[in-house]
Image (cartoon, rainbow, N blue to C red):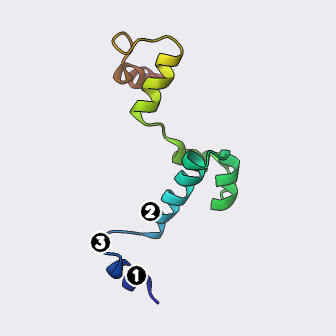
Amino acid sequence: MGAMMLKKWAFIEKASSHSGRTTLLTHIIYTQKLPISVAQKVAGHINPSTTVIYTQPTEQEISEALRNVGYPPDVFSVVNYVMVMKTN
């Protein structure tokens, strides 16, 4: 059965092999909490930096990490953090 037919039956309008791959690797890293090296092997990536793109933290994760090390949200917001990281 073709991929187009499966997409139609599942009422999926936009999907690609890349979106499926992204879902799989993100699931391995975040839901299963396995090391990036496992996702790297599954993806067939030679260089781990290729796999790191699937580990982009959410704003909530960044805020939580900053709170955990003592930065109150009103003093050091996620926006400021991102701006500092972009300039370095």
Which callout, 3 or 1, points at the residue further toward the start of the chain? 1
- What's the distance in space between the residues labelled 3 and 1, CA to CA? 11 Å
> Which mark is first along the chain, 2 or 1?
1
* In this rendering, position of residue 38 left or right of residue 25: right
How many other residues sit within 10 Å of disc 2, few (<14), some (14-19) or many (≥20)?
few
Residue 81 is situated, as x and y percent measured from the top left of the image, at 42, 21
Q: Separation of disc 1 and disc 2 at Cα?
A: 15 Å
Residue 41 in picture, x, y percent from top left: 70, 57
Q: Secondary structure at mark 1?
A: helix
In space, the residues marked 2 and 3 are separated at their CA atoms by 12 Å
The residue tagged 1 is: 6
Q: Nearer the viewer, residue 18 or 26?
A: 26
Residue 31 position (above or below residue 4): above
What amino acid does circle 1 point to? Answer: Leu
Residue type at mark 3 is Glu
Q: Which mark is residue 72?
A: none
Q: Which residue in the structure is indicated by mark 3?
A: 13
Q: Are marks 3 and 1 in contact (CB under 8 Å)?
A: no
Between 33 and 85, the one nearer to me in the picture? 33
